[in-house]
């Protein structure tokens, strides 16, 4: 079953056993949250709901893709994102969903709202490193950066460092970390 909105799964009418649901998350989904790191891309989440007599077991499998400026060259780089999530919903006499791994649903509940869970799953699965594979960066930008670095190393930074070392006691040098950010 394909579900686009509003990211809830009605479970009351479901037969016992396994049920799959597919959710597609795009820019519009993330725009509804105040602090989203995601502003592009497409994410497909398969939800496996295993309905049992005393509880439901939820398993989410995420496959997506998002584009960032590369950490090294700044050109756009598209990175595959995978992740998963699992929790249990027990049937109880009242509703409690604070716990990450075990929720409790009272008899009045009839649907599972996984909107927040989807948002968190994507964010927890984002890679820390967002760069092209080695050797796949924009060659002209890499060349420019290399030239710039060599030039800086050979005069500006080196001279600045030498002067500081001569004029500044070491404890002051450590406090002042702005000296090399003079290029902007
Ligand atoms: Zn790159």
Image (spheres, helix red, strand yellow):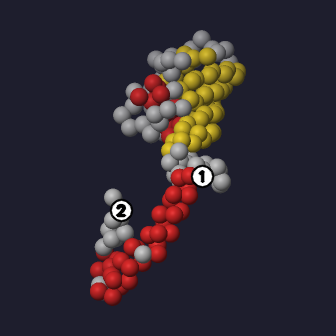
- Quadrant placement of the N terminus: top right
The Cα–Cα distance between marks 2 and 1, rounded to whole angstroms, is: 22 Å
Residue 126 horizontal/vertical position (percent): 54, 43
Instruction: Give the image quarter of residue 14.
Output: top right
Residue 109 horizontal/vertical position (percent): 48, 19
Residue 52 horizontal/vertical position (percent): 66, 24
Instruction: Give the image quarter of residue 3.
Output: top right
The residue drawn where x is 44% and y is 69% is 152
Q: Which residue is mark 1?
A: 139
Q: Secondary structure at mark 2?
A: loop
Q: Is residue 96 left or right of residue 61?
A: left
Residue 29 horizontal/vertical position (percent): 46, 26
- Quadrant placement of the C terminus: bottom left
The answer to which of 158 and 147 lies nearer the viewer is 147
Q: Secondary structure at mark 1?
A: helix
- Answer few, some or many: residues within 10 Å of disc 2's Cα (few below 14, many 20 plus, some between 14 and 19): few
Give the numbered dot on residue 183. 2
Q: Looking at this rendering, what residue extends furthest in the right direction?
A: 17
- Answer few, some or many: residues within 10 Å of disc 1's Cα (few below 14, many 20 plus, some between 14 and 19): few
The residue drawn where x is 29% and y is 86% is 167
């Amino acid at each position: 079953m394909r579900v686009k909105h509003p990211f809830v799964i009605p479970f009351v009418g479901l037969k016992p056993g396994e049920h799959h649901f597919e959710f597609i998350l795009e820019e519009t989904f993330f725009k509804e949250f105040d602090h989203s790191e995601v502003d592009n891309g497409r994410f497909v989440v398969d939800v496996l709901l295993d309905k049992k007599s005393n509880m439901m077991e939820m398993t989410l499998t995420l496959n997506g893709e998002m584009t960032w400026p590369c950490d090294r060259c700044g050109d756009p780089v598209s990175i595959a994102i995978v992740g998963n999530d699992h929790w249990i919903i027990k049937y109880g006499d009242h509703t409690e969903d604070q716990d990450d791994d075990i929720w409790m649903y009272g008899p009045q509940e009839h649907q599972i709202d996984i909107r927040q869970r989807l948002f968190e799953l994507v964010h927890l699965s984002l890679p820390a490193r967002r760069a092209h594979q080695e050797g796949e960066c924009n060659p002209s930008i890499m060349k420019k950066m290399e030239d710039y670095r060599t030039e800086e190393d050979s005069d500006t930074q080196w001279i600045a460092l030498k002067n500081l070392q001569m004029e500044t006691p070491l404890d002051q040098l450590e406090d002042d970390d702005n000296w090399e950010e003079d290029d902007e």
